[in-house]
Structure formats: structure tokens, C-alpha cells
Amino acid sequence: MTDAASLISSNLVWDNHGCMPLRPFDEDFLPQLERYRAAGVNVILLNVGFGEQGIEEHVRVLAHFRHWLSSRTDRYLIIETVEDIERARASGRLAVGFNLEGANGIADQLSMIQFYYDLGVRWMLMAYNRNNRVGGGCQDEDGGLTEFGRKVIDEMGRVGMVACCTHTGYRTAMDVLTYSRKPVIFSHSNPRALHDHPRNITDEMIRACAATDGVVGLNGIGIFLGDNDNSTDTYVRHIDHVVNLVGARHVGIGLDYVFDIEELDDYIRKMKGTFPDGLGYDVGAGLRMVEPERIGEIADRLLAMNYSDEDLTGILGGNFLRVAKAVWRPADPLTAAAAE
């Protein structure tokens, strides 16, 4: 019988959401990207901005991350094409892409979508807890996808950027899932049926995501898994719920691991509207998370539950790869030939 270690070493492992510090001059934490490689992860999508932050904050962090990674090409490869993922894996490097948590990162400028994509951003949230120009957040009075939001979805589809409805309100998410002609993801969301938090998503939303041939990435944040419960058993229970609902084809990993809790506490203090009282966003409360190093243990538990090798191959990374192939812009033939 296949064991978890063999599965991880022989298959693509993709964590769809990681949170390094968003300080554009601080390199102290960036070496911790090695934790992903040590855990057997081949692909990580790093957040470069979120919530109330605007264009300048996003671009400065993106420039910082790209500069740091580009000077260490022996260990990291910034993703430009789907083919780069296999190139990185074959050479023992970590493939790194980026994401935006909320459309405040583009402000009112549609052309920013192409700009970010060209710099490695591969998915963007519609909203982050609160309403914006695109639509409603999951902790706000959600009025649905706006006219500007439809233009954003159209432009993302043209450019090759994946639309994500994590942190997004129910009505806006359902509008996006209906309107988009491409697969839509929940990059790091958990089922509300298992833990009733407004940040989590309903079974109806999960089914609608699967209907687009999208993927739900399960996050490892304790307050969304349960009562600050980051146990492997609870995380696997959330995976199993989504699999039983829509099938293993529509499940992935998006741990949302935060490397600097002190920085997160600072943001919670500054963004009280985004992180209101009473929902578990407590400064200094000791937020518990599922670490990247636990991916092997998660795979082991799923194998013990009689998940097939095929199911695990998809959950570990194959499902997000399928979405990338369906949405990302194809490689330019001349550029691809030059990279060989």
C-alpha cells in the first residue's frame, strides 16, 4: 500500500495560500520559505496584500518578494507559466506565485489586472471581509457583484487570472460563480456546515464552485476550523466534508499559514472594521494554525480513511494544477523554447 511519504515525493504538492510578512524592506522571514521545501511542497502562492491596503502597498511588497526570489534562482522559480511548475519541481526548486486578497489592490483601474498578472499574481479575491468596488465581503451587507465587478471578472478571464471568492459575501460569491466562464476557486475557505463562522462557506457555495470545475482549498486557521482548533483530525474532517459533498476533484490545500503573528496582531488593531470583535480576531489570543510541515500527516490520515492514490494526487496539488491549465495564459511558444 502506498504511504504518505511516497505520495508526497512522487506527486505535485501545492499550497495555494501562504502569508509572509508584508514589510517591503524586511528579509528576516523570507528564508522561512525553506519550510515549504522541507515539507515536500512544490508550489506556494504568497499573499502580497489584503483588505484595506491599496495599490502602493501591494506593488511595494510584490517588488520586494520578486527581488529576493530572483537573487536565489538556485532554490526558487517565480511562476510565469504552467510549465514552470514542472520545471521547478524537476530541478528541486520551489515554484512561487502571488495572490491579492481583495480587489482593493486594483482600486478603480482594470489595467492593473494585466500588470499584476505579468508580475506573477495568479489569483485575486473579489473582496476581503468588507465591501469594495467589486462586490460584498463575508462580514458586510453584501449587495452582490457590481457592474465594475463584472468587468473585473471579464478582464481576469482575458488575462488568465483566477477569480477567488474566499472572504467574499454569499450573494457576491454566487454571482461570480454564475457569471464566470472560467473555473472559480475558494483559495482558503472551510465549510460552514462544520463551524458556523461568517468567514466560512455554505454547502451551496461549495456545490456552485464545483459546478465551475473549481477547487475549494481548505485553510488551517483554528478559528475557522473550530474553537481555535488546529488539530490534524479537525482539518481532515473539513476536507472529508467537502469531498463527500462534491468529490475529491474539487478539493485542495490552502493552509493560510501566517509566519509573523505579531504583524497579524498589528493589522487586527489597525483594521477594526475588517476584523470586528466577537468573531475570534483577538489580539494576543494565540491563534493556532496548521503548519506546512503537517501536510504529510494530513495525507497519512486520508490514506487511513481509504482515500485512493488518485484522490490524494488531486488534493495534494493536481486539482489546482488543473485550474491553472484551464485559466492561466498559455506560454508564448518563443519564450517557452528559449527556456528549454
Image (cartoon, rainbow, N blue to C red):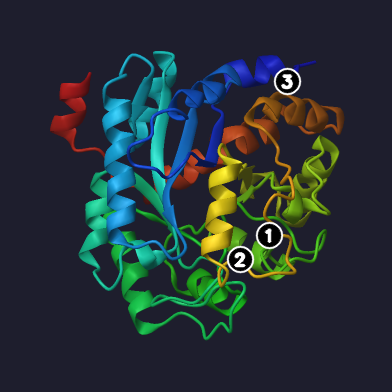
Relative height, residue 89 to residue 108 (above, below): above
User: Which of marks 1 and 2 precedes in the sequence?
Assistant: 2
Q: Is residue 25 left or right of residue 273?
A: left
Residue 81: % across, % down: 31, 36
Quarter of the view holding residue 120: top left
**Residue bearing the label numbered 2:** 275
Q: Residues within 10 Å of mark 1 (few under 14, many from 20)?
A: some
Instruction: Let me know if residue 100 appears in the view.
Output: no
Amino acid type, mark 3: Ala
Q: Are marks 2 and 1 in contact (CB under 8 Å)?
A: yes
Q: Secondary structure at mark 2?
A: loop
**Residue bearing the label numbered 1:** 281
**Residue bearing the label numbered 3:** 4
Residue 217: % across, % down: 61, 48
- Locate the C terminus and report the quarter of the image it occupies: top left
Amino acid type, mark 1: Tyr
Q: Secondary structure at mark 1?
A: loop
Residue positioned 20% across, 63% down in the render: 111
Between disc 3 and disc 2, the foreground one is 2
Relative height, residue 164 to residue 129 (above, below): above
Q: CA distance from mark 3 to mark 2?
A: 37 Å
